[in-house]
Image (cartoon, helix red, strand yellow):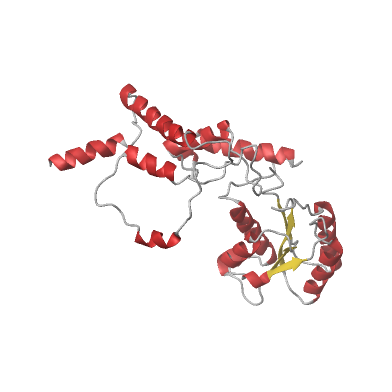
Amino acid sequence: MPQYRDNLNVLRRAFPQPVSDQEHDAWFVFSVLRALDRVDAMKSQRPILGEPQQIDFSKATAATVPDEMSTVELVSRNLVDHLAGMFIWGHPRSQVNVINPPCIPGILGTLLPAIYNPNLCSEEASRGVALAEAEVISMTARLMGYDPNSSGGIFTFGGTGTLLYAIRLGIEKAVPGAMQNGIHGEMPVVVCSDQAHYANKTAASWLGLGAKSVIKIPTAPNNEIRTCLLESELRRLLKEGRRIACIVATMGTTDAFGLDHLEKIRELRDALVHEFSLDYVPHLHADAVIGWA
């Protein structure tokens, strides 16, 4: 029983208190500050935290869950140590891919939900956080020229999740009832440029279309999809009776920031729908995960 009580006290100390407790609240803030101080001590004129470490993934297989309970202090130190050698994206000497530096309001936007863990599955479990989601969707709709009263959106776990939803919507348009009945016969295809993100293949694989159902179109030297080749390939697919689930326009490639001509692609799609008398309209997705930023 004494050991249980000791463990219970350590466990309780590791959680924010549900009611105001000045002593515990101060210790919570101090724990965060102590971790930040340790990170700050790793900074230098170089665009990395601490010293680069050679990662040996073979050692990961030896990792075990400790028999004894740890403390907030030890876990904090361990977490900070795992940042050693990481790039500081906002450093003036850092230019790595297109990863953006987080801003302080954005960090707070992550910290506060991390403390109280709102569940966006319903407004009863998330209250104003659910409202914030709806507000951001309306803001984005207006920026894109959509009517917020007749448009909608959804938060995803990243670029792959965004494409997952887009292709899934496209499948339902190309094969109505697929959500309930599955896909029978020849798989519909996804069409994108050869500079499009590899997440297109990931999402197509997860949805059961298969990576081979992703058709790549050559790009120009500026990384823009060649719309003339896109047209000829779409014609070929439609003449063969293939259904086009989704056309993905890349609005900012991850290396050279190539931009596909979205308006031309939409005009081309609409013209082909009319010419081939399609009973559906292939979904057009603007992959602006990078271009949006």
Quick check: 167 left or right of 194?
Answer: left
Measuring from the top left, give residue 93's x and y in whole percent.
Answer: 64, 40
Quarter occupied by the N terminus: top left
Dividing the picture into quarters, in which one does residue 15 lie? top left
Measuring from the top left, give residue 109's x and y in whole percent.
Answer: 53, 35
Q: Residue at x 66, y 67 (%)?
A: 175
How many numbered marks have been drawn onto this rendered protein structure?
0
Front residue of 202 and 95: 95
Quick check: 65 left or right of 249?
Answer: left
Front residue of 97 and 253: 97
Q: Is residue 188 visible?
A: no
Dividing the picture into quarters, in which one does residue 2 lie? top left
Quick check: 280 left or right of 107?
Answer: right
Quarter occupied by the C terminus: top right
Which residue appears farthest toward the left when viewing the image? 1
Q: Is residue 70 visible?
A: yes
Seen in the picture, residue 260 relative to 86 is either above or below; the reply is below
Measuring from the top left, give residue 7's x and y in whole percent.
Answer: 22, 41
Front residue of 153 and 278: 153
Front residue of 168 and 279: 168
Seen in the picture, residue 68 relative to 284 is either above or below; the reply is above
Quick check: 43 left or right of 58?
Answer: right
Measuring from the top left, give residue 271's x and y in whole percent.
Answer: 86, 61
Dividing the picture into quarters, in which one does residue 280 lie? bottom right
